[in-house]
Image (cartoon, rainbow, N blue to C red):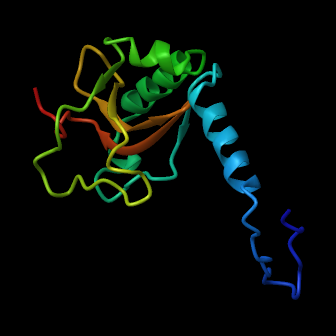
Amino acid sequence: MVDALENPGDDEFKIPPVEDDGEIDQSLNIEINRLISSNEGISISLKYYQDKVECFSEWQGKDLKRFSGLISKIRNMTAAQLTGSSSLCDTHKGKPKAQRYSWPDGISEEITRYELKVDQSKKSRVHGALIGSTFFLVWLDRNHQVFPS
């Protein structure tokens, strides 16, 4: 069993050694399974967002309003509902050709990449990974340049 963290100073924490009793692996597996099988609505995380590719400041007010509309649509959907909706979500077919679209180190290359359609009648997209009920937004794509039609 792992003891609680000790606080030797105001700004640093000492992490106790981990005993190899399998308890941490089991709790990690439980958390991963909870995330994968979640029936919660979709949320969007900016943890891996790459603003050097495209920044929200480049979007017009109408684009931001459409992005807000996308959030409103998906917040009550499960992951299965979102990925099953071709009008909102597509999987990436290969890798983008432009070098500026590099996948962040924090998300495995094995994770399926998705594009969410911000505006079905126009070109605006956002790209990222869906893990459990969280969409990790990586790239903004207002002019549909990651995978142009």
Quarter placement of the C terminus: top left
- Which residue is at the front of the view, 16 or 11? 16
Q: Position of residue 82 (x, y in %)?
A: 45, 17
Q: Which residue is drawn at 72% across and 65% down?
A: 20
134 lies left or right of 124: right
Residue 145, how many percent across, how many down?
16, 39
Q: Which residue, as the protein is rendered here, is positioned at the far bottom?
A: 9
Instruction: Compare residues 122 and 7 and report the one nearer the observer.
Output: 7
Image-quadrant location for residue 147: top left
Q: Where is residue 58 shown, x and y percent of the image?
A: 32, 46
In the drawing, does residue 44 fall left or right of residue 28?
Answer: left
Look at 10% across and 47% down and name the residue there: 97
What number of labels is visible?
Answer: 0
Question: Most extreme residue toward the front, as rendered?
Answer: 21
Residue at 32% x, 11% y is 87
Q: Which residue is drawn at 31% across and 12% down?
A: 86
Whether residue 120 is situated above or below residue 99 in the rendered picture: above
As displayed, is residue 78 above or below residue 141?
above
Q: In this view, does 9 lie to the left or right of 112?
A: right
Residue nearest the observer in this picture, 45 or 23: 23
Position of the N terminus by quadrant: bottom right
Q: In this view, does 70 lie above or below 6?
A: above
In this view, the residue in front, 139 or 104, is: 104
Q: x, y percentage for residue 49?
A: 43, 51
Location of residue 115 (image quadrant): top left
